[in-house]
C-alpha cells in the first residue's frame, strides 16, 4: 500500500482540481493513500498537509483554482528547506511526491529528484511555455477568456472611435496574446519574442485609419519590450525564483500611441481574470489524463519524469527536458498572425 503526496505551486490555474481529483481517484483504485500539501512547496517545507479522500475531492472538477492552495515558495531559496522537504517525505512515509506546476515548481522538483527524492511532475501553466509538452492545462481556459475579452472590446472601441490596448499575461512567451489576438481579430499583436518600436506599432494603427477604419485593437503580452525602453514592471523586487513582477506595459503603450497618432487610446488589463473561473472541457480532460498518468509513473517508479501531451497521446518525459528551456512562440506562427496586422 503506497502513500502519495501532492502539491500545487506557482500561479493558480484552471484545471488544477481536475488533476488532484484524478490522482486521488486513480490512487484509491490501487488502495493507496493520498495527502495534499497546502500552499505549494511551503506546505512541503513546513509539513502542512491534509489527507485527500473521495469525499474531499467530490464536486471539484468544474472548480477553478486549487483546493490545496498555492504559493511562489522556492525550496532552494534556503539550504535548510531542502532538508525539511526530505524530512516531511520521511515523516509521512511517502513513496512519491507529485508536484503540479510550471517552470519554477517543476524546476525545483527536478533539483529535488537529483538530490535523491522520489518526485514526479505534472505540467501546469496558463502561459503554455513549458517545454516537452504540446500543451499545459490552464492555457486553453486562459486563451478562451482572453479571446472573449477581445471580442467584447471590439464593440466599445468601434462605438467610441478608440484604440484599445489589451494587456494579456505572458512573461517570456506570448502564446496567449498571439493566439487570442489571432482568434479575436487584433490589429497588432505584441509578444516578448519580438520587440518592436512604438513607431512600428503606430504604423499598423495609422494604416487602418487611412483605409477608413475608426478603431483598432492592440493585444500586448505583459512581457513585451518596447524597443528603446526598459522592460515595464509593476515592482522592482524579485520573487523567490528571481522574477520581477510585470505589469504596466499596456498603459505605457496606450500613452505612446495616443501621443504619436492623436487617436484616443485606452488600456484594459485582463490580469488575473485569465486565471479564474471554471476550466474549459479541454483543460478538464487534459488535467484528468495528466493525473492518471502521474499515478501510473508512481506505480512504475519513474521518478524524475512528468506527464506530457504529445499529439493526442499522454507520454512520460524527463523533468530535465521540461525545465531546460522555455517553449516560446515559433516565428512561423507569428508570421501567420502578422499577415492580419493593420
Image (spheres, grey):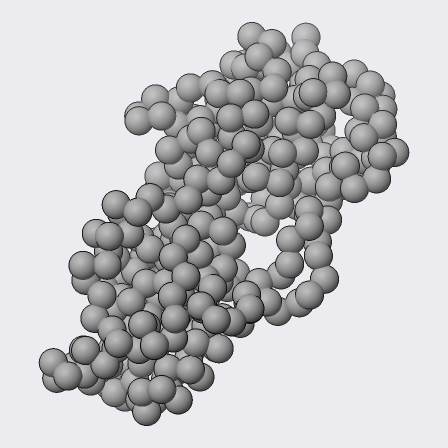
Q: Is residue 223 left or right of residue 104?
A: left
| Residue 142 to residue 31: above or below | below
Which part of the image, by quadrant, shows the C terminus?
A: bottom left
| Residue 293 to residue 9: above or below | above
Q: Residue at x 44, y 68 (%)?
A: 227
Q: Quadrant of residue 48?
A: top right
Q: Residue at x 55, y 39 (%)?
A: 102
For the residue pair 86 and 335, the one nearer the viewer reads as 335
Q: Is residue 235 visible?
A: yes
Residue 252 position in % (x across, y down):
48, 77
Q: Residue at x 49, y 51 (%)?
A: 172
| Residue 298 to residue 228: above or below | above
Name, please, the residue furthest toward the right: 80
Name, please, the residue furthest toward the bottom: 262
Q: Is residue 273 visible?
A: no
Q: Is residue 25 left or right of residue 114?
A: left
Residue 195 position in % (x across, y down):
41, 61
Residue 136 position in % (x across, y down):
44, 38
Q: Residue at x 45, y 62 (%)?
A: 224
Residue 307 position in % (x across, y down):
48, 24
Which part of the image, by quadrant, shows the N terminus?
A: top right
Amino acid at each position: 500500500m503506497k502513500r502519495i503526496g501532492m502539491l500545487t505551486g506557482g500561479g493558480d490555474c484552471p484545471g488544477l482540481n481536475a488533476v488532484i481529483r484524478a490522482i486521488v481517484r486513480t490512487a484509491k483504485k490501487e488502495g493507496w493513500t493520498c495527502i495534499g500539501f497546502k500552499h505549494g512547496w511551503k506546505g512541503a517545507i513546513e509539513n502542512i498537509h491534509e489527507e485527500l479522500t473521495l469525499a474531499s475531492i467530490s464536486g471539484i472538477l468544474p472548480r477553478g483554482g486549487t483546493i490545496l492552495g498555492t504559493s511562489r515558495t522556492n525550496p532552494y531559496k534556503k539550504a535548510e528547506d531542502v532538508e525539511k522537504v526530505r524530512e516531511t517525505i520521511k515523516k509521512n512515509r511517502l513513496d512519491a511526491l507529485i508536484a503540479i506546476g510550471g517552470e519554477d515548481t517543476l524546476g525545483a522538483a527536478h533539483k529535488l529528484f537529483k538530490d535523491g527524492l522520489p518526485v514526479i511532475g505534472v505540467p501546469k501553466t496558463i502561459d503554455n511555455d513549458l517545454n516537452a509538452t504540446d500543451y499545459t492545462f490552464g492555457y486553453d481556459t486562459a486563451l478562451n477568456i482572453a479571446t472573449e475579452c477581445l471580442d467584447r472590446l471590439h464593440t466599445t472601441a468601434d462605438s467610441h472611435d478608440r484604440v484599445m490596448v489589451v494587456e494579456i499575461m505572458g512573461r517570456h512567451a506570448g502564446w496567449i496574446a498571439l493566439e487570442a489576438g489571432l482568434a479575436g481579430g487584433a490589429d497588432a499583436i505584441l509578444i516578448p519574442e519580438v520587440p518592436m518600436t512604438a513607431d512600428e506599432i503606430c504604423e499598423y494603427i495609422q494604416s487602418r485609419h487611412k483605409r477608413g477604419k475608426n478603431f483598432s485593437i492592440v493585444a500586448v503580452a505583459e512581457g513585451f519590450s518596447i524597443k528603446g525602453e526598459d522592460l515595464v514592471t509593476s515592482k522592482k523586487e524579485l520573487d523567490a525564483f528571481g522574477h520581477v513582477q510585470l505589469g504596466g506595459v499596456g498603459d505605457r503603450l496606450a500613452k505612446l500611441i495616443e501621443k504619436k497618432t492623436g487617436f484616443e487610446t485606452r488600456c484594459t488589463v485582463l490580469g488575473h481574470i485569465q486565471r479564474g473561473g471554471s476550466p474549459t472541457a479541454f483543460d478538464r480532460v487534459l488535467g484528468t489524463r495528466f493525473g492518471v498518468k502521474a499515478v501510473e509513473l508512481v506505480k512504475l517508479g519513474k521518478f524524475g519524469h512528468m506527464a506530457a501531451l504529445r499529439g493526442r497521446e499522454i507520454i512520460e518525459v524527463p523533468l530535465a527536458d521540461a525545465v531546460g528551456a522555455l517553449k516560446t512562440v515559433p516565428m512561423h506562427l507569428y508570421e501567420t498572425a502578422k499577415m492580419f496586422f493593420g
